[in-house]
């Protein structure tokens, strides 16, 4: 069973952890949301590696200018793989059970302002709040 943490992306820094939700499903993000996820074969006791991996995936998406491509963006890697093996996926069918991933909804990823520093900072804040949310409401109990 995969674990997914999603929140609406609100481009004015007003999103908060109260708007985040946790599900045990593997579905595409809402067009106006961002999410982080852990696939079914990843041991949840590896929470430090999972949280750091999500950070690395975000850094990869930001640093490789993947944020203005349009459509849903999935960035993933196997939990035991190095940062060099991070991959961009077109959909969830190519995600493996050993992956950790982040996803950015289609409306968020097609926003023309995403190339601007402020918009990137807002997305970074969203992913940071999702990592905090997952620690506070899920990992500390599992």
Image (tube, helix red, strand yellow):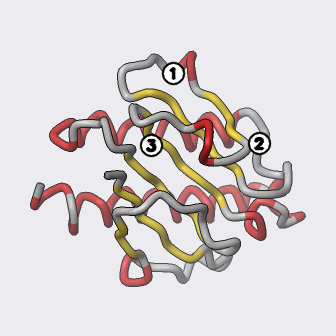
**Furthest-left residue in view?**
141
2 above or below 76?
A: below
Q: Name which residue lies at 43% across and 18% down.
A: 81
40 above or below 138?
A: above
Q: Is residue 85 left or right of residue 6?
A: right
Q: Which of marks 1 and 3 is nearer the N terminus?
A: 3
Cα distance, mark 1 to mark 3?
A: 11 Å
- Residue placed most toward the observer, 44 or 10: 44
Q: Earlier in the sequence, mark 2 or mark 1?
A: 2
User: For the image shown, how many numbered marks are present on the structure?
Assistant: 3
121 above or below 89?
A: below
Question: Badge 1 is on which residue?
Answer: 83
**Furthest-right residue in view?**
112
Q: In this view, does 76 lie to the left or right of 78?
A: right
Question: Badge 3 is on which residue?
Answer: 54
Mark 2: which secondary structure?
loop
Label 1 packing within 10 angstroms: few (<14), some (14-19), many (20+)? some
Mark 3: which secondary structure?
helix
Mark 1: which secondary structure?
helix
Q: In this view, does 12 lie to the left or right of 4?
A: right
Image coords of residue 128 (percent x, y): 44, 57
Question: Badge 2 is on which residue?
Answer: 66
Quarter of image, res 136: bottom left
Q: Is residue 3 left or right of residue 86?
A: left
């Amino acid at each position: 069973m995969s674990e997914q943490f999603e929140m609406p992306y609100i481009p004015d820094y007003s999103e908060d952890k109260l708007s985040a939700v946790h599900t045990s499903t593997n579905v595409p993000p809402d067009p106006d949301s961002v999410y982080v996820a852990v696939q079914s074969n990843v041991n949840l006791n590896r929470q430090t590696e999972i949280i750091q991996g999500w950070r690395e995936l975000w850094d990869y998406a930001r640093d490789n200018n993947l944020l203005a491509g349009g459509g849903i963006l999935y960035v993933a890697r196997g939990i035991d793989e190095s940062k060099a093996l991070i991959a961009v996926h077109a959909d969830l069918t190519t995600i493996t059970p050993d992956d950790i991933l982040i996803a950015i909804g289609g409306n968020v990823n097609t926003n023309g302002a995403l190339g601007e520093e402020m918009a990137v900072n807002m997305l970074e804040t969203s992913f940071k709040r999702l990592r905090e949310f997952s620690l506070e409401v899920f990992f500390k109990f599992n």
